[in-house]
Image (tube, helix red, strand yellow):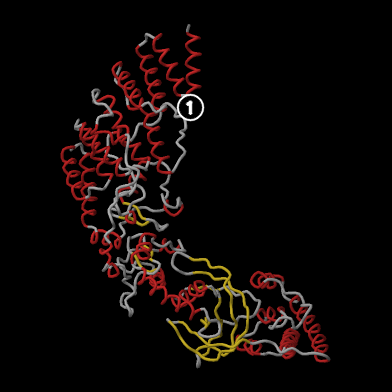
Amino acid sequence: MGTESESMLQLAADAFQSNNFDLAADIYECQLACLGDPGGRQELMVMRADALAFGGKFTEAFDAYRQASETERLRPIHLTNLIEYLSSSIGEQGAGGDGRHETPRKGGQVGAAAAGRPTGGGAAGFGYEDFSCRICLSFLFEPVTLPCGHCFCKKCLERERKEKELPVMCKECGDGSRVAGVQSYRVDVVLSNLLAKWFPTLHQAGRLRREGNALYAERKVEAALDKYNRATLIAPMDHILFSNRSQIHSSLRHYEKALRDAEMACRLMPHWSKVWQTNASYICYIYVIIIPGLSPERNQHKGFLSLPADNLKLIFISHCFDKLSTVLRCCVCLLVPPPRLFYEPVTTPCGHTFCLRCLERCLDHNPKCPLCKEELSEYLVQRPYCKTVLTENLISKYLPSELIERQKIHQEEMAELSNLNKNVPIFVCTMAFPTVPCPLHIFEPCYRLMIRRCIETGTNSFGMCLGDNLKGFADYGCLLEIGDVKFFSDGRSVVNTVGMRRFKVVQHSERDGYNMADIEYLEDVKVEGLAERELHTLHDAVYDQALVWVNSLKAEQKDRIEGHFGPMPQKDSELQQSPNGPSWCWWLLAVLPLEGRAQLPFLALTSLKDRLSGIRKVLLFMAHSRHRGH
């Protein structure tokens, strides 16, 4: 008999898995008629109720759940399949699903609502989605901007960190690397002030909710209820207030009120599954267990099974933003005429917001927050900084004309800085030559700014000139191209560059503490016929002479030179192909023990013949000096 019963139960389970819920319900009903064990009966009755619910027979299903509760008090876990079914039904309705459902599994976690604290869940459907936290999906309260640029409620982040063993990850971008290093969450001052100023009622509701949660945790349930009652009066469209107050009512055994609040939360957020998972356990538990005489068909509770398809929303009050631009101004460039809106806003770990470029320029001089003077050395290493997404979106959406004007100013600045003939940035330091590597240690604030601007404009180039006591810098130089930049925590950086083109300075100028110049590029004059053949002969002779000198160096010297500049280049097959001439000439000039003043004339020459002749004279002088030394 036992074997036959087990076979029938297996058949019912197979039917359930195959979505043949009517057959499964019939088999369970037949087995119930033959079973006398009360414990076993309750389990079978719940299975039959699950099959009826998944078959769409809700009236019979609720009767079956109720009968099972009369045998022995049901626990919330017995309603897991029903809750999952209802949640998936609503989710598929909102997503345009085909109405088919995955077969549930027995068991599972009891919802947070049954665990004994008010729960928040849902989508920010009260008309202020732009200002919602993506964890609780309610209005942002005490907003914190993470290093990745996304904003969440401070308490939500603290709860996530406390409840999860794994490191907190951003709910927007999934970035955990930047977020993991955050030691404490600091409120974003600009956003917090903005939200409190323009949405005082919602801000007040958020504060009451936090106070209510604290009272509930201290088991001061009546006081917590009072806070939530006041909050729902001033924010009647916030689903979390109703969801959490439902839990409080349930704790006080106000089951009818708990049911009404749970249904209101579902009405406000009908297409978000989490609000169902949070509240369906209350609703089902009250229907089936707490209020056995209450039928789901009663008019006052029909909303549970037939909720509206569209979210209830408030129309956003756009006139709140008439003076918003006065709030969203950077305190660093505020005094620069005209007063400027935030452009690419970034928020520091201490919670203060600045324009990206304003902050970078401040950190060039001092690795501390311009407002509160908190140390930001570690923040400096995180380059590139992530923009504060919410602040940037608010400006883009509600202040489009001001943003366009701000973008226009920035684009004009970038266009001016992108010209590699006029106002070219000049690094006054040492000699640089075409094709030759030139690594630089950047530590002065003016040059930090200069390098950053070269990267931002996309030119990745600047001029290198030797210093001059009278003019400031020499009349000839070499354009360098940035390869990569390594930043240090104190703001210093190492920039790897390589020489590209020679130039002559036409006009000197200055900008923001560093030198600039209008320049003309230099190219070697090409020769033909007999002059070209003589040039080849001279080139080969000087190249061989250069090899003799290089090979005469001590092994230690040669290794040091090659480690810095690389090995000596080979002869070029076409001498006049490059406008700068053969690359080995420049490599040799860079490694020869000559002062900058002696090297500079070679940079100005546009005759390859004259350059080779000059190099030959230097090599002959070096050879004679060596012989005299011996």
Q: Is residue 417 left or right of residue 397?
A: right
Count of marks, rendered view: 1
Q: Position of residue 580 (x, y in %)?
A: 68, 83
- The reply, left or right, for residue 514 in relation to residue 301 is right
Q: Nearer the viewer, residue 335 or 393?
A: 393
| Local crowd size for mark 1, using a 10 Å CA cut-off: few (<14), some (14–19), many (≥20) | some
Left or right of 607 in this view: 163:
left
Residue lying at 36% horizontally and 45% vertically, measured from the top left: 160
- Percent position of residue 427, x then y: 52, 81
Give above or below for 243 relative to 478.
above
Residue pictured at 42% horizontal, 57% vertical = 148
Q: Secondary structure at mark 1?
A: loop
Residue 108 versus residue 456 in the image, above or below: above
Residue at the top extreme, as displayed: 1
Which of 537 and 164 lies nearest the eye of the viewer?
A: 164
* Viewport quadrant of the C terminus: bottom right
Quadrant of the image occupied by residue 355: bottom left
- Residue at 73% across, 85% down: 619
Residue 484 rendering spot, x and y as whole percentages = 56, 68
From this view, report whether residue 441 is shown above or below residue 211: below
| Residue indicated by mark 1 | 19
User: Which corner quadrant of the image does residue 293 belong to?
Assistant: top left
- Residue 167 in the image: state x and y as whole percent: 42, 46
The answer to which of 131 and 572 lies nearer the viewer is 131
* Relative to 54, residue 128 above or below: below
Image quarter of residue 461: bottom right
- Looking at the picture, which amino acid does disc 1 mark? Asn
